[in-house]
Amino acid sequence: MIKITQNLILNKTSNILRLFTNSLSTTTTCLKADDRKYLISTTPKKDQGTEGEKTIEIDELIKGKGNIFPDENTPTMLVQGVPFKDLPIVHIRVTKNNTVMSLTNSTGIIQMIRSCGIEGFKNTKKGTNIAAQATAITFCGKIVERGIKQARLTVRGIGPGRMSAIKGLQMGGLNIVSITDMTRVSWNPPRSRKQRRL
């Protein structure tokens, strides 16, 4: 009699556990399905991102700016009373691992150097766009302390800090007169590596 009651109790508890686990699994699957439906309903349609954008006529912008390309009169052009050829130059050298900025006078003599590593960023953080922007802001502060308000800009290399460094110099208060891209282009590059097999 005792064995029969123990078996009945065990059977009932196992049935209750099965019902409980089944109800749990069905609710989780229902929740997953509801989450998926919600995610699909909230994702934007393919063309929704371009709806609000305006078309810009490049030709009209170029006409409004005047001469944006250098010509034979550019070196003698006055920028706030200083000839263009006598303006100091800020050189930005960008790699995927670091961003180095230097200030030179118009003849090319280096006056100041700053990089993301000197600024305090270490290892892989040196190659980020945030590091380049922070370095550019502090570098610009030191330039402005010297009394330099406008400068020419040369950018060399490809990396994540390329545009961020320019933006940081503008945020720091430097008036950028011209931007020159000095990135070296190899017209006869070495043979690329063989494709990786997976």
Image: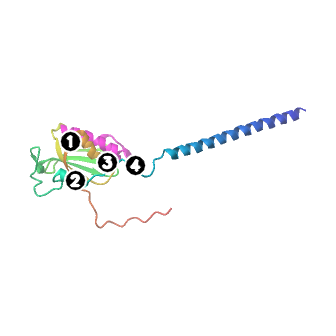
Of badges 4 and 3, nearer the viewer stands 4
Label of residue 161 in the image: 3
Q: Which residue is mark 4?
A: 49
Instruction: Tell which circle, 4 or 3, labels the residue nearer the N-terminal end.
Output: 4
Vertical placement of 56 versus 120: above or below? Answer: below
- Residue 32 spot, x, y in % from top left: 59, 43
Instruction: Tell which circle, 3 or 2, labels the residue nearer the N-terminal end.
Output: 2
Label of residue 35 in the image: none
Q: CA distance from mark 3 to mark 2?
A: 30 Å
Question: Local crowd at mark 2 within 10 Å, few (<14), some, or many (≥20)?
Answer: few
At numbered mark 1, what does the secondary structure look like: helix, strand or loop?
loop
Q: Residue at x 62, y 42 (%)?
A: 30
Instruction: Tell which circle, 2 or 4, labels the residue nearer the N-terminal end.
Output: 4
Vertical placement of 66 versus 174: above or below? Answer: below
Kind of residue sitting beneath label 4 = Gly
Of badges 1 and 2, nearer the viewer stands 2
Q: CA distance from mark 3 to mark 1?
A: 18 Å
Kind of residue sitting beneath label 2 = Glu
Let me know if residue 24 is in the magenta part: no
Q: Which residue is mark 2?
A: 60
Label of residue 174 in the image: 1
- Residue 144 spot, x, y in % from top left: 19, 38
- Residue 165 spot, x, y in % from top left: 28, 46
Q: Which residues, given as a range, are shown in magenta?
A: 119-144
**C-beta proximity under 8 Å, tags 4 and 3:** no
